């Protein structure tokens, strides 16, 4: 088991396939701490708990266009207090809404901190639930997207996922109107 904050911690996870690739919610038994996203399945066996199972259920509803806001206990791994603050603001970006890094910085009350906003997105350990995919470049391009993947944020697979998530939300929002 990985060593986290000076002690051994049991981690729980379940893996499942979506139209967007394989996803693995990871829990510490009380809260979701990470969300990994891969092109292929993982080799190790699932070790689920209630949090990872509930995360899977809510993500499946999100991908089906039936869920717009997640209700999960969250404890993003490896985030400082300042990093957690950016994520708390990020979760307030409404479903189907897109904003630039500069607009996100202003939304967070830090209008001159577009680079810090970008860094918050790049280091997001729980993508989708903390919706960094809703933040794009000022020129209208999607920008980079790590999205819990082990691939580089500029990798075509990651950029396609970000575009697909934006399209999913835009289509679901349009159908609900």
Image (cartoon, rainbow, N blue to C red):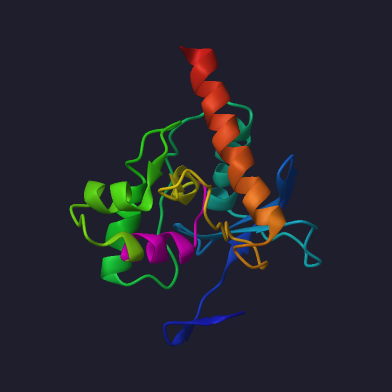
Residue at 45% of width from left, 43% of height from top? 134
Q: Position of residue 143 (x, y in %)?
A: 52, 54
Q: Is residue 101 left or right of residue 143?
A: left
Q: From the viewer's perspective, is residue 53 above or below residue 158?
A: above
Q: Is residue 88 left or right of residue 165?
A: left
Work out which residue is located at the far left of the displayed protein and give it: 109
Q: Is residue 100 left or right of residue 56?
A: left
Q: Position of residue 74 (x, y in %)?
A: 41, 54
Quarter of the rendering containing residue 75: bottom left
Q: How many marks?
A: 0
- Residues 142 and 82: in front is 142
Looking at the rendering, in which quadrant would you find the N terminus? Answer: bottom right
Find the residue positioned furthest to the bottom.
6
- Magenta extent: 116-128
- The question of residue 64 being in magenta is answered with no
Location of residue 116 by image quarter: bottom left
Asked whether residue 111 is in view, the answer is yes
Q: Residue at x 58, y 52 (%)?
A: 52
Identify the residue at image location x=34%, y=65%. Answer: 115
Q: Quadrant of residue 49?
A: bottom right
Q: Nearer the viewer, residue 116 or 67?
A: 116
Q: Give the image location of residue 136, x and y in percent.
A: 45, 48
Any part of residue 124 in sight: no
Which residue is situated farthest in the front direction here? 139
Q: Is residue 126 magenta?
A: yes
Question: Where is residue 13 shown, x and y percent of the image?
Answer: 63, 59
Picture residue at 46% right of the left edge, 66% below the top: 123
């Amino acid at each position: 088991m990985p060593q986290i904050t000076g002690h051994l911690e049991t981690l729980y996870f379940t893996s499942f396939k979506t139209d967007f690739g394989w996803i693995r919610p990871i829990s510490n038994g009380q809260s979701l701490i990470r969300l990994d996203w891969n092109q292929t399945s993982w080799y190790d066996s699932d070790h689920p708990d209630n949090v990872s199972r509930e995360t899977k259920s809510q993500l499946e509803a999100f991908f089906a266009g039936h869920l717009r806001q997640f209700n999960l206990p969250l404890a993003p791994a490896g985030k400082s207090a300042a990093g957690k603050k950016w994520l708390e603001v990020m979760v307030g970006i409404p479903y189907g809404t897109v904003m630039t890094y500069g607009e996100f910085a202003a939304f967070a009350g830090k209008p001159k901190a577009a680079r810090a906003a970008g860094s918050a997105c790049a280091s997001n350990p729980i993508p989708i639930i903390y919706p960094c995919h809703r933040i794009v470049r000022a020129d209208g391009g999607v920008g980079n997207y790590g999205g819990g993947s082990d691939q580089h944020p500029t990798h075509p697979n990651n950029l396609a996922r970000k575009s697909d998530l934006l399209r999913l939300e835009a289509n679901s929002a349009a159908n609900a109107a």
